[in-house]
Amino acid sequence: MSDPIIKLLQDLRPEEDYSASEDYFVDGLLDSLDLITLVSALDRRYGISIRGVDILPENFRSVAAIRALLSRHGVTA
């Protein structure tokens, strides 16, 4: 079974290998537009609303960071 977070990331940029990166922004795998698109996809997928104050690169720089953010919203991913 594939990781649902990796799947959402690959939907954004299928050519990238997210499993090989520890910081998607530093490595150029995500930019600010991708971040907004990812937040929207996460909100839809998990039925949550990520607050503006949480839309910071450090909350989205890796699968672990995204999972931690989702966990704060009561989601296990």
Image: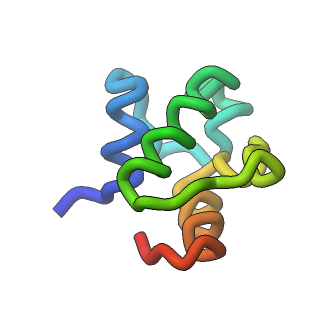
Residue 67 vs residue 44: left or right?
Answer: right
User: In what quadrant of the picture does the N terminus appear?
Assistant: bottom left
Picture layout, residue 57 above or below residue 11: below
Quadrant housing residue 41: top left
Name which residue lies at 47% across and 49% down.
Answer: 42
Image coords of residue 74 (percent x, y): 54, 78
Image coords of residue 14 (percent x, y): 33, 26
Residue 36 vs residue 16: left or right?
Answer: right
Name which residue lies at 67% across and 43% down.
Answer: 23
User: In what quadrant of the picture does the C terminus appear?
Assistant: bottom left
Image coords of residue 25 (percent x, y): 69, 33
Residue 4 vs residue 18: left or right?
Answer: left
Name which residue lies at 65% across and 74% down.
Answer: 72
Q: Residue furthest left?
A: 1
Q: Judge by depth and name the residue closer to the eye, 47 or 55.
A: 47
What is the basis of the colouring in this image? rainbow
Picture layout, residue 12 above or below residue 77: above
Q: Judge by depth and name the residue closer to the eye, 76 or 52.
A: 52
Residue 14 vs residue 58: left or right?
Answer: left
- How many numbered discs? 0
Quadrant housing residue 31: top right
